[in-house]
Amino acid sequence: METSCSFLSCDHDDDERSWTMEDYAGAIPRWCPGCGDHAILAAVERLLETEQLPPERTVFVSGIGCSSRFPHYLTTYGFHGIHGRALPIATGVKLRRPDLHVFAVMGDGDCCSIGAGHWIHAVRYNVDMVALMLDNGIYGLTKNQTSPTTPQGHPSNTQPKGSHLMPLNPLSATLGVSNASFVAQTADWMPAHVYATIAAAFRHRGFSFVRILQRCPQYTDDLFQEAVRNPNLVEMLVHPDGVDAPELEKIFKNRRVHDPKDLDMGRHLAEPFDRIRLGIFFRDESRQRYEELRHQRIHTAQERIDRLNEEFEKYAV
């Protein structure tokens, strides 16, 4: 039987339905107890409820890794792709269906290793979607191999005597790509800040890159342990146009006012420091978005010649 519309094509502006966090919950998560993925999933479900995003118009795309099980644990549409390919798939979905709310969920190896080329170009294309990079500094699902963000000296199955190189800095790398428009960092042990950061990323028009610091309870459980125990080792970046979680003010008293429009300062603050910095490092909604540029009229060679001739005749004596 033919119908005039479907969930994938109807205009839902007059949609009177409502959803709770439970409505977005899919299969029971099978992450290890203590994994930060649980807190991140809860923050995402809270965002979906707050924004009342229709499940059939929301898509989560992932690659390979523990974090990439995300689509299975939500009742939205999902695409569990292959290693390092979450971003090109998510980009394709958004370009073909700009009416959908698209999220890409990746691990540190997924994004910064095999997916690094896609990561750079996704930033440059600035397509309107949210990219969450869950960074626990290790390949956890495949059982303890060094990743690009593994701390120098941390032992793994691939480098038993410790990682040889300094870790890659995802914030500096993203801020160094032309046309970057939103770069932020949060941490799994601060659920309120995780939610506020993801919410700001969702409301941004453009490609929103959020690095979420987390610990793998099996292989990197001590990665940020000092900062977890000592709030003085954390510095919050605050600004009226940034991210703030008022309930954390009494705990995290190191607060730096940073205007997210200041790219140079954002790059400076992203460099290694004796404290972990959390917040929005850069945001600029005026950056070009590929999905809008591609629909602009492209003049043919003859049209350009005719236009030049018109300009020449206008100014000819």
Image (cartoon, rainbow, N blue to C red):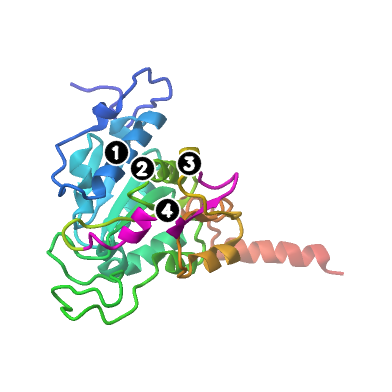
Q: Which residue is mark 1?
A: 42
Of circles 1 and 3, the one toward us is 3
Q: Which residue is mark 2?
A: 191
Of circles 4 and 2, the one toward us is 4
- Left/right placement of residue 28 relative to residue 150 reads left
Q: Earlier in the sequence, mark 2 or mark 3?
A: 2
Give the residue type at disc 4: Pro
Query: Magenta part of the protein: which range?
Result: 220-245
Q: Would you place residue 315 above or below residue 240 in this image?
A: below
Give the residue type at disc 2: Pro
Question: In x, y percent, where is residue 70?
Answer: 23, 46
Q: Earlier in the sequence, mark 2 or mark 1?
A: 1
| Residue occupying the point 24% across, 44% down | 38
Q: Earlier in the sequence, mark 1 or mark 4?
A: 1
Dot 3: element: loop
Look at the image and say whether residue 178 sits in the magenta stretch.
Answer: no
- Left/right placement of residue 88 relative to residue 68 reads right
Q: Which residue is mark 4?
A: 231
